[in-house]
Image (cartoon, helix red, strand yellow):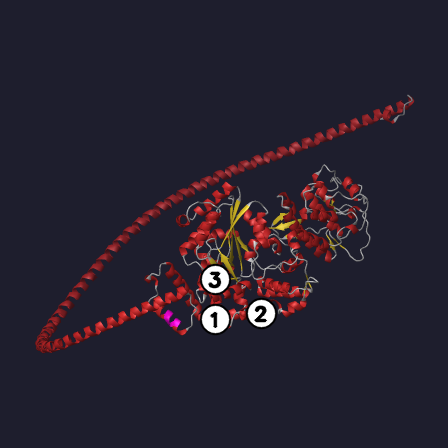
Amino acid sequence: PYMVLEYLEGKTLSQVVEGKPSLHQFTEIMVSVVRALERAHEYGIVHRDLKPSNIFVTDRGQVKVLDFGVARLIDRTTAATELAATRPSNAPRTEGDPRTAEATFTSNSLVGTLPYMSPEQWGIDTVDHLSDLWAVGIMFWRTFTDVHPAGSHAPDKLRAVLTDLKTPLPSLGKQDPKLPAELVAIVDKCLQKQKANRYQSATELLAAMQAFLAPKQARLEADACPYRGLAAFGEDDAKYFFGRSNEIRTALGQLESWPLLAVIGPSGVGKSSFVHAGLIPAMRATGTWQVCMLRPGRAPLHRLANVLDEMRATGDHLTDVLDQLTDSPGVFGKLLRTSALHRSHRILVVVDQLEELFTLCDSDDARRTFLAALLAAADDPSSPVRVVLSMRADFLDRLANHKQFLSELSRGLFFLTAPDADNLRETIVRPAELAGVAFESASIVEDMMLAATSRGALPLVSFAATRLWDARDRERKLLTSSAYQHMGGVGGAFARHADQIAAAVPPKSQPLLRAIMLRLVTPEGTRAVVDRGELVSLGDPHEVEQVLDQLVRARLIQVHVDSDQAATVEIVHEMLITEWPTLARWLTEGQALRGFMHELRQAARQWDSHGRSGDLVWRGATAQDALANAQRHVLDLSAVESAFLAAVRALAVRTRRRKVAAISTIIVMLCAVIAGGAIFTLKLARANAVAQDREAAANRAAQEAQTARAALQQKLDVIEEKEQARRKAEAEAKAAQEKAVKADETVKLSQEELEKANVELRRALADAESEKQRAQTEKHNAEAAAEVARKASAEARAAKATAEAAAVREKARADKLEQEAKSIYNKDLRARPAAGSNQPGELK
């Protein structure tokens, strides 16, 4: 047998309360607690000892209800009436001992922690699930007032106040008039002494608490759509943002201890919404924050300079600020900290979609400077500056070349995953409830959840909810099943909407629509941020503007205008790239040209920004490939790209003409060379004849020399044989001499070794004699010691005999004294009654 326990890291609610959480934060935690109670009560489990020390908030923001050690199982429909006994005789400690309020008390039939026990736990009614709701109210009281509604923690006082059903407990609003009236009403209802007057289930309490957390202004806007479709949630949409409470608490905790937070997750998980509608409002609730938001774009350093200008951290010109950032990226953090100190506030820098640093920016130096500047702003946990990044998980490996930034980033990684089933349900259901609208059937929610789980596409679910909202039954305030089926579910709603927008574009503008959408996708399959002017230059400006306006109104693309009034266009969400079949087909058909068009756009943009310098025009094989693509395909080019290709073509024509002229010159030169070669050939023939005669004479002389060389070689061979024999005899004599010398040396060594052996033998004999004498000495010593031992043993036996004789004498003396004492006592006993005294004390 073995037991498996979940290991949790975090804090108990008691420790969280010590940090003085805001009313909103504490209520959100208690919402999770009530959810846990709701599930436990469904199975007939009553906790009976709910208190802050039994509630745990993990480091990941999850809320756990622990310690069901004294829980009981009840039948909620036929609960037996089990009245608690009266106060036990061994009453607990008094109010003066602070441990009384924290110790679980289980003597006799009192079960629970005294300050959190309901009236029925004191013995006036049946203990059931409503006792846990009472404890929820007590926790609110003690958190925000530091006192108990009974006015004391003493057991006698608690029992007297809580068992008096005629006198209600004081209202939380009287103790703290600043608390919201709605929350006061919730707590007061939890603390009704009569169970019938409380919330009758955890579900009812949960609905009331969630209604309290929902902003009032949101509930008044019944006609406003609470869903955001494909668009990301902004800070103003925080009231509609649900399902991320745990993650928000965790992110806040990380930012308290580390100044850099990187929200990493797959596309479509809601990173931007989490940061803007979840994290930023939560941080504003903790203090005074100045929030600066940016996206890297094509010129990331310009974005940093704009942040400094927004903070009024420097009065320098933009060019001067850019020069400072390039020379010393650390100046970014220094200026932000200085601004924060001067204005007595904290600064939050939000960098959304950091992957644009790799998809849109072409400069490695700009990337390196941008990341170094962010590190400089987030280099000290005690600094008033915090940096929050959001980036797609599949771009995380792009930071491998920036090891210092990646090392610091690893300490602040926050992986955002798709919400679990409960939180996903909340993101679908709660916005509608906020607007007073319900789903007609639970099957709609289940199907939408399945679509989100299988696709990992929260934006698609939100878009489907938006379409469902538009088709809602306004009279019954219902999101109907018929409307959901009619729009084809989640996937069908999106594809149908996008196809309807595409079909609404006039036939003559269809090629323009395709060109626009293809330009808004990078070769990596991500969103591209494109200048509006670049798109307008694709065709007739009026026609392009009409198509762009249709796409914007349909929420397929969005237009951004920065502080310099420069407009950029991008797809509203990357899910459009993968989930719209028409766009996917266009991308597949143009796959071969996508890389070329991206390179062409980049080159044309750079060429135009440098004054259309001829040095930047394509040449060679690159130019040939570009012109071949332009000849084989109908390219949708902007004015700048058309001008760039025209420059490439003109340069190619000029290059071709120069080649033709060079070839003609070469041909003329070759003819002249051929004529000169004929003359040279005649002269060469005459020279060859003379050379042949001379060669014959040389051959004859060579043969004679060869014969003389052979005779000479024979004589040399005889001499060499004799010389080899002489060297061999000399070598043998030398070897014999060396052998004799070695034999003499061996004899000398043998004599020396013999002398050494004799010396060692004499030394060994002397040592043996010494050892013999030492052994004899030790033998004599041992014999003497044995004699001493024998004498000591004899003395010990004598001493023992003497002691035994003395003991016999002492025993005889003691017996004699005892006989004398008895004789005296008997004599006195006989004499006392005669004197008339028989009292026991006197006899004794």
Nearer to us in this view, 142 or 548? 548
Q: Is residue 686 left or right of residue 315?
A: left
The magenta-colored residue range is: 625-630
Among all residues in the image, which is located at the extreme front?
542
Q: Quadrant of the C terminus?
A: top right
Pointer 1 or 3: first along the chain: 1
Give the main secondary structure, helix, strand or loop, of the magenta stretch: helix
Instruction: Answer with mark 3 or mark 2, whichever residue precedes in sequence.
Output: 2
Q: Residue at x 60, y 63 (%)?
A: 461
Tag 2 residue? 496
- Look at the numbered disc 1 and give the secondary structure of its residue: helix
Provide the residue designation for mark 3. Answer: 528
Q: Amino acid at mark 3?
A: Ala
Q: Hey, which quadrant is residue 786 in on the image? A: top right
Q: CA distance from mark 3 to mark 2?
A: 24 Å
Please name whichever residue, 831 or 322, is drawn nearer the observer in this view of the structure. Answer: 322
Give the CA separation, mark 1 to mark 2: 20 Å
Relative horizontal placement of residue 672, taking residue 173 as reference (left or right): left
Numbered badge on residue 511: 1
Q: Nearer the viewer, mark 3 or mark 2?
A: 2
Q: Residues within 10 Å of mark 2 (few under 14, many from 20)?
A: some
Measured as percent of width and height from the top left, residue 763 is found at 38, 43
